[in-house]
C-alpha cells in the first residue's frame, strides 16, 4: 500500500488521471489525500467530484475555499462568480448526493501513525495541532447540521483578521474558515492578511508566510497544504505545499508520504484559465 497526497485539482480531471497513471495508483490498495479545491475554475468539476467520491475510504479530502463556495452557491445563499465553472455539477442528476458527500468532508485530517496533517491553506501561528483539530470540528458540526445557510451567508469577508478564543458566532467561524481555506500570510503577531497572493518576497515587509512565523506553535508537525499556486511546490519549514498551478498551466503534483524520503511526481497541465486572483 502507498499513500499519496495530491495538490489542488480544481476540476482538471484529465491531468488527475494522467498523474494517477504515472504513480501507478492501485485503487484496491493505495490511498489518496487531496488538499481540497477539487472543484471550480477547471473544465470537469463534475467528473472530478464523482471520481473522488467513488474511491470511498481510499480517498481523504479536506475542504478548500472553492469547495465551500460551491456549497454556498448550491444552497442559493450567494451568486456564482464570473469565473465559476460549476453549471454542469449543479445541474447533474446526482447533484444532491455529491453535495452531501462534499459537505461531510473535514477541514483537517491528521494521521498520527504516518505523522502528517492535511489542510487546504494554513494554520494560524497561535494554534497547536490540538487547537486546530478542535476548531475544525466546530465548523464541521455547523456544516453538517441544519444551519448551513446562515454560515454560507456570512463566511465571506476578511475580518476579523486575528484569532481570539473569546470570538463567537459568525466572526469566530469566519476566522477559522479563513485560516483553513484562504491563509497565505500573517504578521509577526499571527494576524491574518488575506490580500497578498504572490510568492514569498512579493508581500509587504511586515508579513511572512504563515509557516515561517517564528512563534508558530505547530512547528513540530509535518503539514501538507495546497491553495497557494504562486508558491508552487514547497518542501521546507516542516511543510509541503502541493499547489503547483495545474489550473493555470503549471503542473499537478503528488507526493508519496510513506516513502523515506518522500517522493514527488508531477504531470504538466494545459491552462484552463489565465492567472487571476483566487
Image: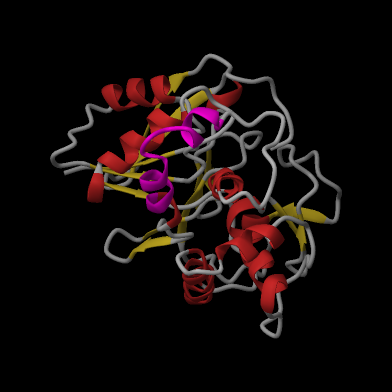
Name which residue lies at 86% across and 48% down: 204
Name which residue lies at 47% across and 71% down: 141
Tally of numbered discs:
0
Residue 184 in picture, x, y percent from top left: 68, 50
Residue 129 in picture, x, y percent from top left: 49, 71
Res. 108 image quadrant: bottom left
Can residue 124 be seen in this snapshot? no
Instruction: Determine whether 240 is above or below 155 in the image.
Output: above
Q: Residue furthest left?
A: 28
Can residue 71 be seen in this snapshot? yes
Q: Is residue 94 magenta?
A: yes
Instruction: Determine whether 251 is above or below 216 in the image.
Output: above
106 sits to left or right of 177? left
Q: Quadrant of the N terminus?
A: top left
Q: Main secondary structure of the magenta part?
A: helix
Viewer-proximal residue among 169 and 148: 148
Q: Residue furthest bottom?
A: 166
208 sits to left or right of 128? right
Instruction: Determine whether 93 is above or below 106 in the image.
Output: above
Q: Is residue 130 magenta?
A: no
Q: Quadrant of the C terminus?
A: top right
Viewer-proximal residue among 46 and 63: 46
Looking at the image, what colour scheme do you see?
Answer: secondary structure
The boundaries of the magenta stretch are: 86-101
Amino acid at each position: 500500500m502507498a499513500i499519496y497526497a495530491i495538490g489542488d485539482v480544481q476540476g482538471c480531471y484529465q491531468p488527475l488521471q494522467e498523474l494517477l497513471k504515472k504513480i501507478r495508483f492501485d485503487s484496491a490498495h493505495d490511498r489518496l489525500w487531496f488538499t481540497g479545491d477539487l472543484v471550480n475554475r477547471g473544465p470537469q468539476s463534475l467528473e472530478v467530484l464523482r471520481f473522488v467520491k467513488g474511491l470511498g475510504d481510499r480517498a481523504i479530502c479536506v475542504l478548500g475555499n472553492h469547495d465551500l463556495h460551491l456549497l454556498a452557491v448550491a444552497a442559493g445563499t450567494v451568486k456564482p462568480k464570473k469565473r465559476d465553472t460549476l453549471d454542469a455539477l449543479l445541474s447533474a442528476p446526482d447533484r444532491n448526493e455529491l453535495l452531501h458527500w462534499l459537505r461531510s468532508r473535514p477541514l483537517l485530517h491528521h494521521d498520527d501513525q504516518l505523522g502528517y496533517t492535511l489542510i487546504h491553506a494554513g494554520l494560524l501561528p497561535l494554534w497547536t495541532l490540538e487547537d486546530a483539530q478542535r476548531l475544525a470540528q466546530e465548523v464541521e458540526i455547523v456544516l453538517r447540521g441544519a444551519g448551513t445557510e446562515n454560515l454560507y451567508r456570512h463566511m465571506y469577508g476578511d475580518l476579523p483578521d486575528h484569532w481570539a478564543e473569546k470570538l463567537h458566532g459568525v466572526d469566530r467561524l469566519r476566522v477559522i474558515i479563513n485560516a483553513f481555506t484562504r491563509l497565505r500570510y500573517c504578521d509577526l503577531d499571527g494576524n491574518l492578511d488575506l490580500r497578498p497572493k504572490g510568492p514569498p518576497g512579493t508581500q509587504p515587509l511586515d508579513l511572512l508566510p504563515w509557516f515561517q512565523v517564528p512563534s508558530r506553535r505547530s512547528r513540530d508537525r509535518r503539514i501538507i497544504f495546497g491553495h497557494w499556486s504562486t508558491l508552487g511546490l514547497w518542501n521546507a519549514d516542516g511543510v509541503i505545499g502541493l499547489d503547483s498551478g495545474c489550473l493555470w498551466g503549471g503542473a499537478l503534483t503528488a507526493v508519496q508520504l510513506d516513502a523515506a524520503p518522500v517522493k514527488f511526481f508531477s504531470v504538466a497541465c494545459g491552462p484552463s484559465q489565465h492567472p487571476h486572483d483566487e
